[in-house]
Amino acid sequence: DSKLDLALAVNAARADAGLGPLAHETIYSYVGNGAPVLIQKSLGPDVDEEQVNQSLQFFLDYYREHMLDNTCLYPGVAEALEKWTGDKKLAVLTNKPERFSKMILDGLGVGSRFARVYGGNTFATKKPDPEGLNRLTDEFGALPSRTLMVGDSAVDVLTARNAGVPSCGVTYGLQPETFEQHPPDLLVDRMEDLVEILCNGRQR
C-alpha cells in the first residue's frame, strides 16, 4: 500500500513548481501508468514540458527518500507469502521504477520472496503492454495458461489479456473500481484466499 507516500511526493513536486496541493483521492486516480504519466496528470495541461521534466526529477528524488515513510504490506499479504508452498515462482511486474520497487520490497522484508522484480523502466514498454509478462513466462518456462497475473486495477487485467494469461483482481488497492469495465477472471478479498485456491485447490 504505497498510495499515501506517492500522494505526498506528488504534492511536494507541485509545491516545488509553485502549485497548490491536490486531494489525495485525485492523485490516486492518476496512479498506475508510471511516474511520467503521474506527474503529467498531476501538474495539469497548462504546464510546459520543461516544467514537467523538472517536476518529474523532483518527484523521483523526493520519493526515493520518503517511499517507506507510510508504505506497508496490505493486511494478509505477509501471511500469504509465508503460506506459499510448492514450486510456484513469484515475480513482481510494476510500473514503478525497478530500483524503487526492489528497495520497497526489501524495506518491507519480502524482497527475497520474489524470483524477479521488473519495473516500469526495465523494458521499452510499460503495462498494459505484455512485454514484461511475456519475458517472465519465457524466463520461467511457464505456459501462459499456467501463469496468473494478480493486481488491483484494469491495467493489470489488460496486461494479462494482452499476454494471454489469466488474471486475478483484489478488491483492495488503488483502483479496484476499474474492474467494472475490465473484470478479472478471479476476484479475491484477501491474498490468503488466493493461496488457498492455488495451493490447496479450494474453489469459490
Image (tube, helix red, strand yellow):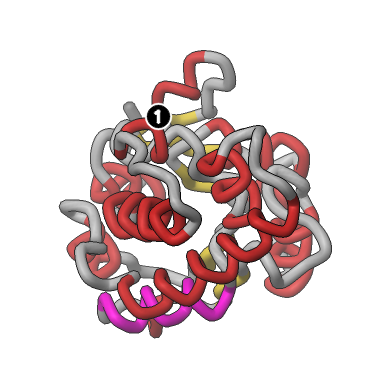
Q: Could you say where residue 20 lies in the image, as x and y percent from the top left?
A: 36, 42
Q: Amino acid at mark 1?
A: Pro
Residue at point 39%, 39% (across, down): 28
The quadrant the C terminus occupies is top left
Asked if residue 169 lies in the magenta stretch, the reply is no
Residue located beneath label 1 in the image: 176
Which of these two is toward me, 90 or 69?
Answer: 69
Q: Which residues are magenta?
A: 98-108
Left or right side of 9 for 148: right
Which quadrant does the N terminus fall into?
Answer: bottom left
Number of numbered discs: 1
Question: Measured along the vertical axis of the image, is residue 182 above or below residue 153?
Answer: above
Q: Nearer the viewer, residue 32 or 115?
A: 32
Q: Residue at left 18%, top 54%? A: 76
Residue in the image at 34% along x and 68% along y: 85
Residue 67: x %, y % from top left: 34, 70
**Is residue 87 positioned above or below 204 on the image?**
below
Q: Residue furthest top?
A: 180
Q: Is residue 104 part of the magenta span, yes or no?
A: yes
27, 174: nearer the viewer: 27
Where does residue 201 sit, x and y in percent of width and height?
A: 36, 44
Answer with the quarter of the image where residue 94 lies.
Answer: bottom right
Q: Judge left or right: residue 163 versus residue 61.
A: right
- Please say whether residue 79 is visible from this viewpoint: yes
Farthest-out residue, front:
18
* Residue depicted at x 27% and y 72%: 68
**For the residue labelled by badge 1, is the local secondary structure a helix, a strand or a loop?**
helix
Residue farthest to the right, as pictured: 124
Q: Is residue 89 visible?
A: no
Of residue 100 and residue 62, the one placed in the foreground of this image is: 62
Q: Left or right of 202: which side holds 123?
A: right
Identify the main secondary structure in magenta.
helix
